[in-house]
Amino acid sequence: MERKIRVVMAKLGLDIHWRGVYLVSQFLKDAGMEVIYLGNKFPEQIVEAAIEEDADVVGLSTLGGNHLTLGPKVVNLLKKKGMDKIKVFMGGVIPPKHIPLLKKKGIYEIYGPDTPMEVIIKGISDSVSVN
Amino acid sequence: MSEEAKNAKCLFSEEHVRLIKENYDDWFKNCLRDDDRAMEGKYFTHSGIPVKLIYTPADTEDIHYMKDLGFSGKPPYVRGVYANMYRGRLFTVRQLAGLGAPEDCNKRVKYLLDHGATGVSILFDLPTIRGYNSDDPEAEGNVGQCGAAVDSIWDIDAYFADIDLGTVSTSIVTHLPSTSLVIPGMYFAVAEQRGTPITKLAGTCQNDFIMETCVGSAPEILPPSVSFRMQCDVVEWICKNVPRWNPISFNGYNLREAGTNAITEVGIAVANAIATAEELIKRGMKFDDFAPRMSFFWDLHNDFFEEIAKCRASRKVWYKIAKERFGAKNERSLLMRFHVQTAGVTLPSTEPLNNIGRSAIQGLAAVFGGCQSLHLDSYDEAYSAPTEEAALVSLRMQQIIQTETGVVNTVDPLAGSYYLEYLTEEMTKRIFAYVENIEAMGGLVSAVESGWLHREISNYNNKYQKDIETGAMKVVGVNFMKSEDANITPIEVFEYPETYRRQKAKLKRLRKERNNQKVKECMKILREKCHSKENLLPYCTDAVKNLVTHGEIAELFREEFGLWPFPLIS
């Protein structure tokens, strides 16, 4: 039996808006992935959980503006622990001009507002089969 | 007039209604096509109320004008809370202003006031909302983003530099009760320091426990019953001491944005008001002592007529509860006054200039709904907190509605629309049923503690998203009329990267300058009072006057009351 894709989803830091991340978690689950929703966590906790849960992918949600500071922190911590095979995705309110900056810092893909679910599902699936 | 005549269904005579019904049947059978007839029963408002192809007096035959609609400023207040409505007082143009350090926000507040805003609405960053100082590790990356950083009383002073607190009306969007114990106290203390008695101050603070425990998630959350206690502390103290201040603004808006329909939006807010009233009565207050200052905060979403009907129905619902359930004697206790914010969740990132149209239409609906105060979301909603340019457009749209359209010159101008009156009646019924359901569950605090409300929100969002994915719900530019070569309007994002450094330096100075012995004493007293039944607000105000920071007080609450696990987490 093919191993299910394992996704750890989290709200990044203090951001309060949980509507989107919870919804995406449900849609990923419906698409056959194993999804662990952590709620609000800081980078160290997210990385710890990702390693513990043997995650393929980490999904970060933020609408509060901390994406440039805390997003790359997650990437760097994973790298430090030798776990940079785990792909980090981001969703939320992220200004378009920050997207290339985030990608340069190791965020695999960013899904802004109104991204269709099928795009997210395919994006995550494809990223794992790249390994 | 005989009693019989007074009670008669008298919008139209029974004979005329019969005539209309006969003609309706004829029209339905002979004027419509087969596919028109097939589609009847397949249209609904967003919250699921059936929508017929045509409405006639037959659909409103049970409405008794004087009993069910009446006049503005008189029961059941469907037509408006004040007799003269907008001729007497236009809705307050109250656009939000908050980003960066308080000194930056001060500039934006002055900008809006200079350009004709008639009320101030201040918004905080996430560390401030959730109770962390700008230099706490948890605040990293969030300082000054999406709102203003307020760590101490110095920051409220800076926010309102050169602004006469005695003349402005300020809405302090505190979100949570725990934050409402602290920041309004800072505002009141600053006013007193400047020589303005707090009895003169006009404004609102949000103070809603469902913001703390349901609408927004966070790494550290106080238990719902604790947050609810704080909510009631704030209402109680402010009602007794700051007579022109609205100590609560029942949600409404943020709940709707998190994911509910119009019925739930009003139902939860009213259930919250009922729970608050019952608690305050237990504490020895009379309903009329606090009800006049209870205010509400509605969203204004896309379904134009449903949203107008919601506004009108909500006034009737509150009137009946205040009068029949709580026996209100003061007329002002019967009035549901509300601020409206247009629905941010309806404003996509694609083709952002379209959002000017969306907000304008929603704003117009809010005015048809009789709001007391209005904020129009800006076209860059999906990008960042509004730039000055975007904020100005929103401000101007409000002014255009007020001065160029004529809609404010007559009370409740859409009254009598058969469709609108049918919707208003139907929504009134459904809201009451929803409130009864919450009561049957043991009240709103229980419904939140059990995770029931969180699941309601999640289920709604799931359906909403599926409707968008399948195209059942169309969003222009997103899943309908999607333009592959749409010009990406360059959106300037509003940033204040210096905020963290400025606040950090300010906090360093504050900790040096304050009397740290006094700080310790205030904290010790507050810690004890947490476990008493006393009202916490005055102790928080003492603390902030002695330069205890907001983050220190919030951390104290977390330590003393413990944390509550947010539902739905794996």
Image (cartoon, coloured by chain):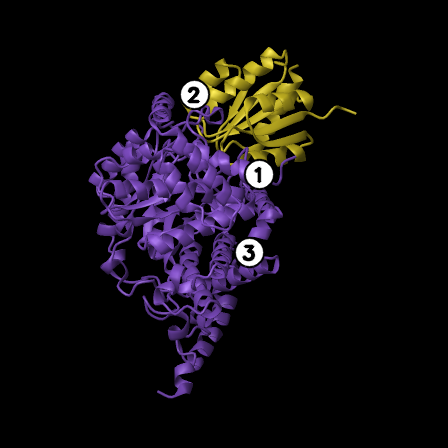
Between B531 and A11, the one lying in front of the other is: B531
Query: Mark 1 Cα within 10 Å, few/some/many (few <14, many 20+)?
Result: few
**For discs 3 and 1, the disc positioned in front in the rendered view:** 1
Which chain wears purple?
A: B
Between B512 and A32, the one lying in front of the other is: B512
Residue type of the residue flagged with mark 2: His
Image coordinates for residue B202, horizontal then vertical, percent: 29, 50
Image coordinates for residue B336, horizontal then vertical, percent: 39, 59
Query: Mark 3 Cα within 10 Å, few/some/many (few <14, many 20+)?
Result: few
- Is disc 3 placed on a helix, strand or loop? loop
Look at mark 1 in the image and give the residue it sits on.
Answer: B562
Which chain wears yellow?
A: A
In the image, are marks 2 and 1 on the same chain? no
Residue type of the residue flagged with mark 1: Gly
Q: Quadrant of residue B409?
A: bottom left
**For discs 2 and 3, the disc positioned in front in the rendered view:** 2
In this picture, residue B154 sits left or right of residue B308: left
Q: Earlier in the sequence, mark 3 or mark 1?
A: 3
In the image, are marks 3 and 1 on the same chain? yes
